[in-house]
Image (tube, rainbow, N blue to C red):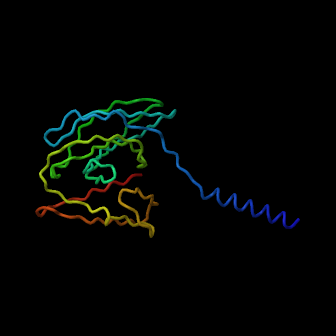
Amino acid sequence: MKKALLSIFFILTLILGFSNQAKGAYVPKIYVQKLTVSGVSNGRLEGKFVIWNSENYYFPEIDYAIKLFKGTDFNTLQLIDTKVSDALSISPEETVLESFTYQYPKNIVAGDYTLRIQVVTAQGTELGWDDKAVSLQGQNNTLNILNEYSKVLADKSQYSPLEGANVSPGTDVAAYLKVKNPGDETTVVPQIKIFK
């Protein structure tokens, strides 16, 4: 009888112990589709895209981010700039046509870039996106962030700057960036986006 009780206790401990460790987060199925760029002039991109909410739920606070990456190979893209829209609402199973005008940084190096439109929740969770390759002209005066040396430190843990670390309110957070200046002396102002 003792062995049977010990076996049951052991099995229950295993089941309850592992069930507390496995946690998942619900990620809404909201996508960006049909991204088109209709014009590139005077340091500005114009275009349209569709946001599709494939869920049966209403989402009152959905943002979209316009991201510019250096390069066109998905595996080697380097983030150059991000602009986040004002919040919009989207009904269940609705598609919304959005127009955009994006002023890209004038000091970039001329070349091929990837424009990405990505849906972002109010909490900062990144959802579906669509990419479009674009050729852009710039003043060839920019600082390059060396991603392999950049990090965020919080709660004795280390994260990459684009990882989206979850940090409790009141926790000290430090961000470190290493940059390379391939041109003349320049002045920069860092911009940091913190989501709720």
Q: In the displayed structure, would residue 184 be above or below residue 138?
A: below
Quarter residue 46 falls in = top left
Measured as percent of width and height from the top left, residue 49 is found at 32, 34
Q: Residue at x 37, y 30 (%)?
A: 96
Q: Is residue 155 left or right of residue 33?
A: right
Q: Is residue 1 left or right of residue 176?
A: right
Residue at the outermost bottom position: 156
Quarter residue 14 falls in = bottom right
Measured as percent of width and height from the top left, residue 177 is found at 29, 65
For the image shown, how many numbered marks are present on the structure?
Answer: 0
Measured as percent of width and height from the top left, residue 127 is found at 42, 44
Q: Residue at x 22, y 32 (%)?
A: 38
In the foreground, 196 or 2 = 2
Q: Residue at x 17, y 63 (%)?
A: 181
Q: Residue at x 32, y 64 (%)?
A: 148
Q: Is residue 48 left or right of residue 106?
A: right
Quarter residue 1 falls in = bottom right
Measured as percent of width and height from the top left, residue 65 is found at 33, 44
Q: In the displayed structure, would residue 64 be above or below residue 188?
A: above
Residue at the outermost right position: 1
